[in-house]
Image: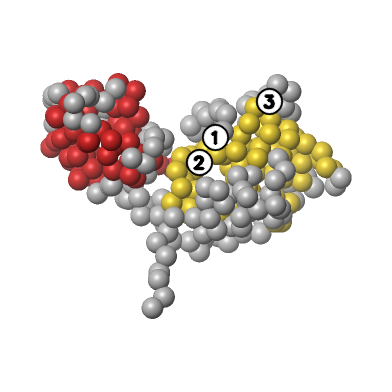
Amino acid sequence: MSKAIRERIQARLDQLGKSPRAVSLEASMSADAIRGIFRNVDSSPTVETLTKLAGPLGVTPEWLAFGGDEDIEAAKAATAAMPPASLPVVGEVAAGRWLEADDHVDVPPYDPVPVQPDSRWPVEAQYGLMVRGTSLNRVALDGDILACVDAITARYRPREDDLVIVEMRRNAGLLRQMTAKRYMRLSTHIELWPDSDDPRWQTPIIIPFPEDGLSSAMEDEDGRIEVRIKAMVTWIHRPMQTRRR
């Protein structure tokens, strides 16, 4: 059975044009998870592993485990019906940068990321945000793209150490800041931390427990700030750099 499972995983990788590393990361596993499955020929992947891989591969866990009626041709047909392989990039995250609420461009001047949307969530709930600055430089550099899923659509509730998109608004919503932070739940409050070795970004956003799990508020010397967890980050895309000759 283990050989057949590996063959089905490889067939889906070939059909989707995805690398083992990319699918492993989309499944919230280690980058070498699929390569480990291919190397470990004496045992079969666990049910939990197949369940995680099924979404990014666009099939069911049952098909990965047993094959059956949903054969390779059926999987190909499902792939053909999937949306175009791209993720729109709609804006930026930048710690400490407050913008006026209407300071935006109608058509974002960003190229889409050439990847297939994650089949676990509606396509319209998925988008990319470009990282600006160094507040995430332990995991994402300036110019990297955060793949995001809208929290409300996904019925998402943050978990410890999740990377989340945080929107802050002040002055009755006239000023807005969009940033990405690590989620930490303490006994009395929530802390949203930068993930950076830059000395400028070593202080968390501290908010009371959100009643709905997503929305809260805080006070600073300039007044009240509305804080909302807008999305979860599912993976990070690093554009290929052009090497100068």
Q: The residue under label 2 is which amino acid type?
A: Val
Residue position marked by numbered label 1 in the rendering: 162
Residue position marked by numbered label 2 in the rendering: 233
Residue position marked by numbered label 3 in the rendering: 186
Give how far apart the Cα atoms at labels 1 and 2 are: 8 Å
Can residue 88 be seen in this snapshot?
A: no
Q: Answer yes or no: do the residues labelled 1 and 2 have beta carbons within 8 Å?
A: yes
Tell me the quadrant of the picture where the C terminus can be found.
bottom left
In the picture, residue 114 is in which quadrant? Answer: bottom left
Q: The residue under label 3 is which amino acid type?
A: Leu
Using the image as rendered, state which of residue 137 and residue 58 is in the foreground.
137
User: Which of the two marks, 1 or 2, is nearer to us in this view?
Assistant: 1
Question: Dot 1 lies on which element?
Answer: loop
Mark 2, other Cα within 10 Å: few <14 / some 14–19 / many ≥20:
many
Residue found 44% across the figure and 55% down from its top: 238
Residue found 56% across the figure and 33% down from its top: 161
Using the image as rendered, state which of residue 24 and residue 167 is in the foreground.
24
Using the image as rendered, state which of residue 172 and residue 243 is in the foreground.
243
Q: The residue under label 1 is which amino acid type?
A: Asp
The location of residue 201, given as percent across then percent down, is 69, 49
Question: Dot 3 lies on which element?
Answer: loop
The location of residue 86, given as percent across then percent down, is 37, 52
Sooner in the amino-acid sequence: mark 2 or mark 3: 3
Sooner in the amino-acid sequence: mark 1 or mark 2: 1
Give how far apart the Cα atoms at labels 2 and 3 are: 21 Å
